[in-house]
Image: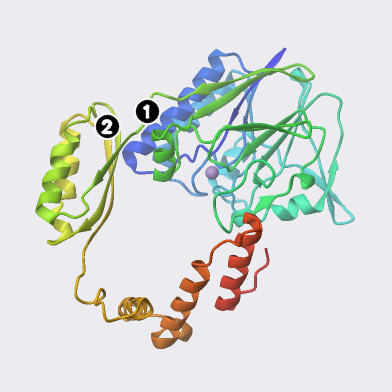
Amino acid sequence: MSKFSHISDVHLGSLNRRLREINVQSFVNALETSKNENVDFIIISGDLFDNPYPDISSIRKAIKKMKELRETGISIYAIPGSHDYSINNSSIFDLLESAGLFENVFKYKIENEKITLRPTINKKCNAYIYGISARKRGLEEDYFRLLNGYENADGFRIFVFHSAITELARTTKYFGTEIPVSLVPRDMDYYAGGHIHKKIVKEYDHMKFFYPGPLFGADLTDLEDFARGSERGFFIVEFDSKILNYKFIKNDRYIPLLMNIDVDGVDSLSAYKKVIDEVENFNVKDKIVLLKIWGELISGKTTDINKIKIRDKLMNMGALDVEISFNVTVRKTEKYYNFELTNEEISKNVFRENLSKMKFEREFLDGDKGVSLAMDLKAILSRDQGENEKKDDYIKRIRDDVFKRLGIENDN
Ligand SMILES: [Mn+2]
């Protein structure tokens, strides 16, 4: 029996300094656990780094740990993801690969303008690892479309990729690319997915797909999902010629604490007092605090809600880190909510006033043209889904209309 770890979307180098350390520590812990579990190798399905050129000092510990694993004979196989890919092979990924820290498993030969994938072989386990690198903005779709299969091998076959798959792991981004499952090579024993920041295990037409999602989180949205109960961690898989067993190793050391404080309908000073009072009800010791403050104040200034003091208070209560997301406005009575104006006129006024504060190079965004563009887009985006219309068709219709109005070619 052999064993491997499957880790993805670590995004080393992301987030602010304190959270970045925790993210790096999560990766170091995952490698340590893998070593203690005696895995034979490790698969990383893209976005190991948050960008092609991360701050080296912040990821030093991660690199040291990878080196330590290599020295104990544990191979690391990886592909670049959409974040750490670089077009001219000059990223930290390329650098560390050429230093022998891990192996890039996107290997292929080109014949008649088609790609045939070649395996990276782990002899000891009789495992054959194939991969397709991600590119920016989902451009790896081209690789999938050019795919002419893979050099077959008699062993345990792993396919490593970094893409959303339409039928089972969709992207939440409106314009994000998805690969139809029909383009994914068949008859692999394990499909090691990345890019979707969510743990997914799904079988589709005898293909077993595994997305571990991030170990901790790449941004505040990920951390909020984590706080709301999304599991974070990685897979450990046992196999011989087939999968024998797998488990998800949870990272639950630093589950963030989400605080939602609504300051709607009060004046700014009462709002500030409300926040200061409410945070006291939480036990924040050693917690990452995600504080969301939102609402429409009836009067005062939003700056009366002193974020620095709120943050200091929580840090003094023992919080590990505090991230405040602030969505507070002050009610505007006279200008826009004049009852003699129609909704349309109010919208126009709002657009006109805001556009006048900005400068555009393109004429069609400026002045009256900008207002009429904004009005048209508002109209398109407020259209409802037709009764018998499928969601995908609805999204496509809206998207097509938006593109048309903006005069952009829609190549989706
Ligand atoms: Mn990612």
Q: Amino acid at mark 1?
A: Tyr
* 6 displayed left or right of 342: right
Residue 220 found in image quarter = top left
Q: Which residue is mark 1?
A: 254
Asked if 292 appears above or below 212 in the picture, the reply is: below
Q: Under tag 2, what secondary structure?
A: loop
Q: Residues within 10 Å of mark 1 (few under 14, many from 20)?
A: some
Q: What residue appears at the point 17 percent right and 30 percent down from the top-left corner? A: 317
**Viewer-nearest residue: 109 or 199:** 199
Asked if 195 appears above or below 241 in the picture, the reply is: below
Asked if 223 appears above or below 148 in the picture, the reply is: above
Q: Earlier in the sequence, mark 1 or mark 2?
A: 1
Picture coordinates of residue 32, whole percent (x, y): 50, 20
**Viewer-nearest residue: 298 or 108:** 298
Picture coordinates of residue 180, whole percent (x, y): 73, 48
Picture coordinates of residue 407, whole percent (x, y): 59, 78
Ligand 1 positioned in quadrant? top right
Numbered tag placed on residue 165 in the rendering: none
Picture coordinates of residue 226, whole percent (x, y): 43, 34
Quadrant location of the N terminus? Answer: top right
Q: CA distance from mark 1 to mark 2?
A: 10 Å
Q: Amino acid at mark 2?
A: Leu
* 297 displayed left or right of 104: left
Check whether the beta carbons of the residues at disc 1 and disc 2 lie within 8 A of each other: yes
Q: Which residue is mark 2?
A: 320
